[in-house]
Every structure is written in structure tokens, then in C-alpha cells.
Image: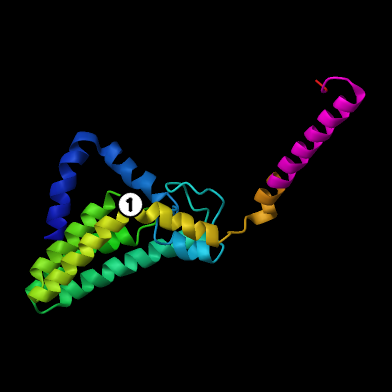
Amino acid sequence: MFAGTLALVHIPFLIWNAPAVEQAYLQQGKRAITNESVWSFPLRLLGLTGSDDRMWAPAGAPHLADTGAAVVQVLLVLALVALAVRSPCLSDALVLAALCPAVFLLSNRIFSPQFVLVVVAAWAVAGAIGPLTAREQLLLGSLLMAATLLQPLRLPLRGALRNQVVAPVPGGDVARRRGRHRARVAAGAAAVAAADLTGRGPPR
């Protein structure tokens, strides 16, 4: 069923423009961990990220972290597929299958706000199929609502984390740039003061 669905979705686009379909996978496959990804938070706490704070920018993590994140992502998805195949209950298998998109997107090296729609939908479908009581369904719905409402708070929360954790930059590039900037400001102030004392204008 999975292979048939995959073929049904991809074959028309492959017939229409195969290079564009291939480029989508090749281009995204080369992307590194971004600041929006769940992987960036532990890496930032460990001081393994760069100085670019833009949410969509690469986190500047080591290449080994990119490889490790991809391996963990594949293992998580394969584990869900294996559990679904071996499950003796059809409803349990469907729940695990429904969770696959959510696990794939949440463990991805990149993350975008639109992913939340798919994640919430996957969890909702899994909750509707699974043998949950009314109270458990209410709890799941409340958690999904909270996750949706908290999504806009990612930026201020991440800003607070950035203020608490100062990630070191290899070679001290940021510190050197700040030092050079302070030196230029001090030199400029000294030149202006000297010009005032001598009655000459500032050097051109």
C-alpha cells in the first residue's frame, strides 16, 4: 500500500518534469541543520553552533551532527514501520503509520512553520484511530492545541535561550570583530579630539 501510494503521487510528476522532482530531493538532501530544527537546541547548549542567529539559516553545527541527525531520523521512521508491520492489530498498525510523517518532520535537520500542520494532522489521525478513551482524546486535543498556540512563541523562547547561552565561535571571530570595531571607534574619537585641539578639521 505504501509503495502504491508513493508511486501514485510521484509518477505523474516524474512524467511531467523528472529533473525538477529529482532536484527537490537532491537540493533538500544537502541542507544542514538549521536554527529551527529540534537538533539545534542541544547543539547550541553544547556550544557547537555558529554565530548566524537567523531562524532559517544553517546552525553551523559540525558535519558529524548533520550525519547523526539523518541516521537517527531514518532509524526512527524504520522503527515505526517495523512496529506497524509486526503489529497484530490493524488499528495499532494504522496509528503507527499515521505517526510516521510527524516523526519524520520533527526529527528532520530542517524545520518550517508549515510542518506543524502536518504534524498536528498526523497526531490527530493517530488519536482518532487509536483505542483512546474520551478523556485521553481530550488530553491529546488539548496538547495539540497548546502546540499550535505555542508555535508563534518559538522566536522569543529561542531569543531567551540565545541570551543565556553564548556559543563559542571557532577562532574567536566574533570577539575579534568586536575588538576591531571598538578600536576604530576609539581611534576616530581620538582623531576628532586632536583636530579640535589643533584647530584643524578632521583628517580626510
Q: Is residue 97 visible?
A: no
User: Who is closer to the viewer here, 140 or 198?
Assistant: 198
Is 121 above or below relative to 139?
A: above
**134 in the magenta segment:** no
Q: Which residue is mark 1?
A: 152
Residue 151 seen in the current view = yes
- Magenta residues, as a range? 178-202
Q: Residue at x 9, y 66 (%)?
A: 128
Q: Report the magenta stretch's main SS.
A: helix
The three-letter amino acid code for the residue at tag 1 is Pro
Residue toward you, 29 or 53: 53
Left or right of residue 122: residue 29 = right
- The answer to which quarter of the image holds residue 158 is bottom left
Residue at x 21%, y 59% (from the top left corner): 120
- Image vertical order of residue 131 relative to residue 168, above or below: below
Residue 164, image x and y in percent?
Answer: 54, 62
- Compared to residue 23, the image places residue 191 above or below, namely above
| Side (left or right) of 85 relative to 33 | left
Q: Residue at x 17, y 57 (%)?
A: 121
Image quarter (top left, top right, bottom left or bottom right) of the C terminus: top right
Q: Position of residue 20 (x, y in %)?
A: 29, 37
Q: Which residue is situated farthest in the right direction here?
A: 198
**Whole-percent x, y for residue 184 in the image:** 76, 37
Taking depth in this image into account, of 105 and 149 the one nearest to the observer is 149
Task: Work out whether 19 lies above or below 159.
Answer: above
Dot 1 lies on which element? helix
Looking at the image, residue 201 sits to the left or right of residue 124; the answer is right
